[in-house]
Structure formats: structure tokens, C-alpha cells
Amino acid sequence: TGWRLRPAARSDADALVAIEAAAFRAASWGGRAVAGGLDDRLVRTIIAEGMDGAVHGFLMWRRVEDEAEILTLATAPPQ
């Protein structure tokens, strides 16, 4: 077993939306906001994925000049 970190791609949107919805339930941003973060040039997202390619969590942040802000951090529920 093991996992690795990698930058998110637009093709990861469905997995990130599902993880964010499971983690935050009623407080979830919703699919449009999570997926929109992947298209924002100031936002970066890194994914934790298993060796099988399954996404287990992610961190999304925004950097503007010399400041950075964590927007969301979520992990998938245990299987």
C-alpha cells in the first residue's frame, strides 16, 4: 500500500466534488465551486492518490502575490 501526491487535473473534478460533498455534507461548496477552482488560474490543487489511482483527498489553495490561503482540504471517507 501507499499513495502519492500530484497536481489535480480537470479530469479529477468528479472525484474532488464527491470527496468534498462527503466531507462537508450540508456545508459543501457544491460541484460548481469545486470544479471552478480547477479552472481558476490563481488556485492550485494537489491530490493524494493511492497506488491504484483512486483519489483519497485533496488540498486546494489560492496564492496572490506573497500571500496564500487554504480554500479547502478534504479526505475521502474510509472504505
Image (cartoon, grey):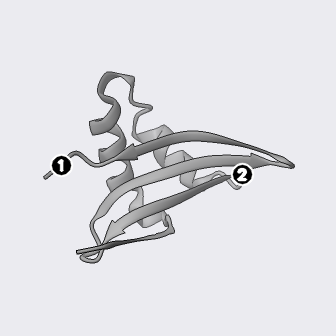
Look at the picture and state if 16 lies above or below 46. Answer: above
Q: Residue at x 86, y 48 (%)?
A: 66
| Residue carrying label 2 | 42
Q: At label 2, which amino acid type do we have?
A: Leu
Residue with the mark numbered 1: 78
In which quadrant will I find the N terminus?
bottom left
- Residue at the far front: name it: 1
Q: Secondary structure at mark 2?
A: loop
Give the residue at x 27% y 38%: 22
Q: Secondary structure at mark 1?
A: loop
Give how far across and how far down residue 76 sits, in percent: 28, 49
Of the pair 30 and 49, the residue shown nearer to us: 49
Mark 1 and mark 2: Cα distance apart in space: 31 Å
Whole-percent x, y for residue 65 in the image: 86, 49
| Left or right: 46 as drawn, with respect to 66 | left
Total number of numbered discs in the rendering: 2
Marks 1 and 2 close (CB-CB < 8 Å): no
Q: Residue at x 44, y 53 (%)?
A: 58
